[in-house]
């Protein structure tokens, strides 16, 4: 599986390769156009003002083909440039959405942080354990509510069997209380 940087490099390399091929075709078409024009001039000089039967039609058809090729070449280059610009815009929008999502979550958690600091200050000056426990429970509920508002919820309770389709393990611990393959914390 390619990383984002490898995909961008591959896409960029492909774009550069196509542009190089396109430039080579454009140079060939230009050389062909010059050859056609030169042949037309030579035919006019040799024949005077008289066109050979059917010769002018062939030259005109060749010129039209060269013009069509140039137009197609231009459309292809525009399409490749549009694709490149679209990819860049998409990357910018994805990055911006990630930043906004992180900012929103962090802003929602700031009150929880403030309340934890207040709780710690109160614990240092007060010896009322019941009010401290009540305050911490309230902060925990505030934290859970902030996460739930953003669609983040806890899956799996301690002692349940670990399911890699539902759960994401942070690590493993040795435990005498829980069987292997169960959620320990």
Image: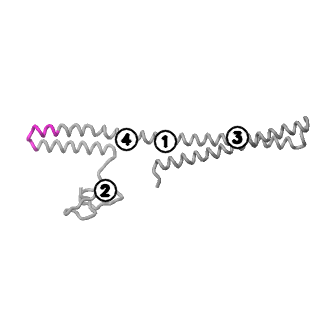
Specify start and end residues of the magenta stretch as a single range. 119-129
Is the residue marked by circle 1 packed among few (<14), some (14-19), or many (20+) residues within 10 Å?
few
- Please give the residue where the numbered disc 1 appears in the rendered image: 90
The image quadrant of residue 49 is top right
- Please give the residue where the numbered disc 4 appears in the rendered image: 101
Q: Earlier in the sequence, mark 4 or mark 1?
A: 1
Q: Earlier in the sequence, mark 2 or mark 1?
A: 1
**Cα distance between the residues tagged 3 and 4:** 46 Å
> Which residue is pictured at 13% across the width and 42% down the height?
132
**Cα distance between the residues tagged 2 and 1:** 31 Å
**Cα distance between the residues tagged 4 and 1:** 16 Å
Q: Which mark is residue 70?
A: 3
The image quadrant of residue 115 is top left
> Which residue is pictured at 65% across the width and 41% down the height?
75
- Please give the residue where the numbered disc 2 appears in the rendered image: 169
Q: Earlier in the sequence, mark 4 or mark 2?
A: 4
Front position in the image: 52 or 93: 52
Is the residue marked by circle 2 packed among few (<14), some (14-19), or many (20+) residues within 10 Å?
few
**Cα distance between the residues tagged 3 and 1:** 30 Å
Tag 1 secondary structure? helix
Tag 2 secondary structure? loop
Q: How is the image coloured?
A: one colour
**Residue 123 part of the magenta-drawn span:** yes
Asked whether the residues under the numbered discs 2 and 1 touch, taking CB atoms below 8 Å apart as contact, a structural biologist would say no
């Amino acid at each position: 599986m390619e990383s984002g940087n490898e995909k961008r490099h591959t896409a960029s390399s492909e774009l550069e390769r196509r542009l190089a091929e396109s430039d080579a075709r454009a140079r060939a078409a230009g050389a062909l156009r010059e050859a056609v024009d030169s042949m037309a001039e030579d035919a006019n000089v040799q024949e005077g003002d008289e066109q050979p039967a059917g010769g002018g039609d062939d030259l005109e058809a060749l010129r039209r083909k060269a013009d069509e090729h140039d137009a197609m070449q231009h459309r292809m280059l525009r399409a490749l440039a549009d694709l490149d610009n679209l990819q860049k815009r998409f990357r910018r929008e994805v990055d911006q959405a990630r930043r906004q999502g992180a900012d929103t979550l962090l802003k929602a958690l700031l009150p929880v942080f403030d309340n934890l600091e207040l709780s710690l200050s109160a614990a240092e000056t007060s010896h009322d354990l019941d009010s401290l426990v009540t305050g911490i429970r309230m902060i925990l509920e505030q934290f859970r509510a902030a996460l739930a508002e953003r669609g983040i919820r806890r899956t799996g309770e301690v002692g349940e069997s670990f399911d890699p389709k539902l759960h994401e393990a942070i690590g493993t611990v040795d435990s005498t209380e829980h069987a292997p393959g169960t959620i320990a914390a």
